[in-house]
Image: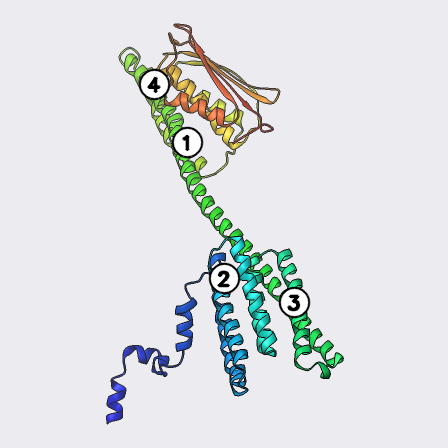
Amino acid sequence: MKERKDVGRLTLNEVENPRAMEKPEEGRFKQYFVRLFGKYDFRNEKDFLRFARWLILILLLLMEVLILWGNGIDLLEAKDVWGMVGLSTCVAVLTVSFSLQLFSNRDGKIRIVLYGLDGLSVYGMLFLVGGTLPLLVFIIVLTGFYINLGKFRISLAVFGISMSVYGMVYSLQLLMRAPQKIEFFGIFLDAFGVTLALAVHFVVVHIALAFYHQFLRLNKALRELDDSKAELEKAYAVVAEVTALEERQRIAKDIHDTAGHSITTVIMQTEAAKRIIESNPDEAKNKIIAANLQAKHALEELRDSVHILSGSTKNQTLKTALLGIIHESTDGTGIKIRWEIEDVIVSEAKYRFLCNTLKEGISNGLRHGGATAFWFELKTEGKEIFFLLSDNGTGFEGEIKTGFGLTSMRDRARALGGDVRFSGEKDEGFEIQLTIPTDGGEEI
């Protein structure tokens, strides 16, 4: 029962995560390492160099402790006090000078002095004790040199000088310890092994640094790509907003040109019917019937505008569509429209624009100019389509004031690569001259 009671006291986290029941000692080293080095971001070169310097210093201290522990005991047992003092001095000087040249921002002269103290300390250590551990210390110090120097040519010069001095120190050590027992073949093998180790170390360090710098360049390129992507997304959002605005303006203009024209025709027919309803009831009835048909046609035009904006294509030619607009405008209204139209093949955008322009021109002539007759011409001249619509209305005096319809007409003509001109005089009518490139020209 006691065991069941203990099991019943398990926390929800322990039940859902069995690892929570593992010994707390497991993973402590990993957690300590993360707390100690997790703050470094290797994508930042300064953080990487700071981490590398700390790691090199820790390895150096570890090697120095091992050297003092192993060789210091031997020196004390041999009562070699001066050897112990010399070794301790070399270790202390190397620790201080190496730390300063790794982490302090000293000028060039002081840094050269620190490099010299590092070299003297390492060579003194090699001379006093020899063996593998001092060689590892020598390699660690060279690693710090290579990282701090950065430039390959300077590092190569340091490598050559270090090898030369190391050879002299090694030879001097052999001569002072046992000159009568020197074996030249063994010396050659040792020198070759040390040279190979230092050369491999030099190559590996610089390959690693080259890979790291390549990683930094790639990471920078990725950041720039991310920034470019963000900028493109912003630009796309702006373009989408502008496109939506243009589409709303186009919808407004299509409704204005199509339904507005038809409703204007209905008004003209009903006004004419009102004037003659008493004197000529039959004619008035015909005009009302025509107005009714025109109103129904206005609804159809609104539906056509929706289909056009949704991307549907026209089945009839441009000439047929323009003649249909002319007939709709003359049937039952009493106005006359003479025309001369070439059968031009155009894109859907130009098709819709030319039809809407004709509707807008006729509607404006009827509403604002009181026109009763129009002349319409559409033809190609070279690589341009020429559109002309003139009326016998009241025209205008002074500077023309363009409303929504005429302004939209001019803007759309320029968007299609063409231009439009409005002209007229008082009691001399109004004229629209439009040119746009054929489908071989520029189009938006």
Q: Quadrant of the N terminus?
A: bottom left
Q: Is residue 27 above or below residue 352?
A: below
Mark 1 Cα within 10 Å, few/some/many (few <14, many 20+)? some
Q: In the structure shown, which secondary structural element does the residue marked by tag 1 occupy?
A: helix
Residue 27 appears at what percent x and percent y? 40, 78
Q: Is residue 103 above or below residue 416?
A: below
Residue beneath label 2, please?
Answer: 102
Q: Is residue 284 above or below residue 61?
A: above
Q: Amino acid at mark 4?
A: Gln
Distance of mark 4 from mark 2, alpha carbons? 96 Å
The mark found on residue 250 in the picture is 1
Q: Are marks 2 and 1 in contact (CB under 8 Å)?
A: no
Residue beneath label 4, please?
Answer: 269
Residue 269 vs residue 43: left or right? left
Looking at the image, which is closer to me, 63 or 260?
63
Residue beneath label 3, please?
Answer: 165
* Nearer-N-terminus badge (4/3): 3
Q: In the structure shown, which secondary structural element does the residue marked by tag 3 occupy?
A: helix
